[in-house]
Amino acid sequence: MSLFVVSDVHGYVDDLRNGLAGAGLIRDDGTWTGGDHQLWVLGDLLDRGPDGIGTIGLVRSLQQKAPDNVHVLMGNHEALALGYHQFPETRFGELWAINGGSASDQEALTDDDVEWMRSLPVMARVGDYLLMHSDATDYLEWGSSVEDINESVTSLLADDAADAEALWEVFASLTNRFDFAGDDGARVAQDMLATLGGRCIVHGHSIIGTLVGKPSEKTEGPISYADGLVLAIDGGRYDGGPLLVVELG
């Protein structure tokens, strides 16, 4: 069994389909061919790109076909979409527009899509890997274990009773970044791994080009940093870079 990860699809559903097919995980028609391999999508399925709803549809279809193999984490754009969907007249509306929110995505979101997004975990530990959307330690504000963190966020977003401030808390925390990129990044990463488990943090959110100071179109693959304790996988597709489907082993 191998573990594959992809992040920040941002509506580029054709790139996702091609990337998964190239990795041998699906056929061109969307049939799962990955056997017992694991696929984790690390958030930000929608906004910025052409077809966020199509991306959600593809991923949810794969989950239905291979429920034990295909998994999705919540990113800040899922939290933003939920906030705008429920509270369009609040600051979510302004932030949604600034951050590439798609009117067509919002119009096409079904109640079932909304409930699905609310139920998404925000992190996972798979073997030696700690998977999350954002390169931030804010997750630890919700608990000291992966299970507690996910339960805390799920409770905050449980139903229509969730208030705007609760949604904003989730969105704001998932939007923070660069906690592992400074001079003390390795120490910060080591402390987080010591608390939550795993030997390597894998994240999307902050595009590789930004982390290394190069244009996104020059990105060729993921980068390891913070003394090898952190792996960044967001190639910056919406910024002209590649959508990376990464095999972790």
Image (cartoon, grey):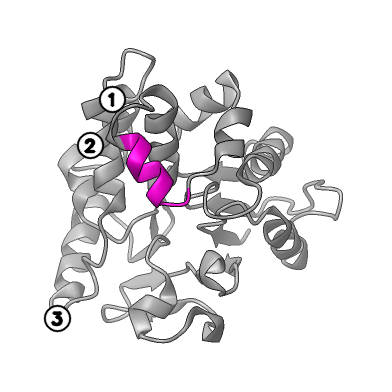
Task: Give how far across and how far down residue 185 sits, in percent.
Answer: 19, 73
Look at label 1 and name its amino acid.
Leu
Q: Which mark is residue 169?
A: 2
**Residue 6, which numbered label?**
none
First-in-chain label (1 vs 3)? 1
Residue at 25% across / 45% down in the picture? 172
Q: Do labels 2 and 3 touch, CB within 8 Å?
A: no
Q: Position of residue 122 (x, y in %)?
A: 37, 42
Query: Left or right: 156 with respect to 62?
Result: left
What's the residue at 54%, 60% (across, down)? Answer: 5
Instruction: Report x, y in % for residue 206.
Output: 37, 66
Label placed on residue 183: 3
Q: Residue flagged by tag 2: what amino acid is it? A: Glu
Q: Look at discs 2 and 3 and give the one toward the viewer.
A: 2
* Residue sitting farthest toward the top: 161
Instruction: Name the disc covering residue 156, or none.
Output: 1
Magenta segment: does it hold 179?
A: no
Q: Amino acid at mark 3?
A: Asp
* Residue range highlighted in magenta: 92-100
* Mark 2 vs mark 3, CA separation in Å: 27 Å
Give the mark, 1 or 2, whose residue is nearer the N terminus. 1
Residue neighbourhood size for the residue with mark 2, other residues' Cα within 10 Å, grouped as few (<14), some (14–19), many (≥20): some
Separation of marks 1 and 2 at Cα, in angstroms: 9 Å
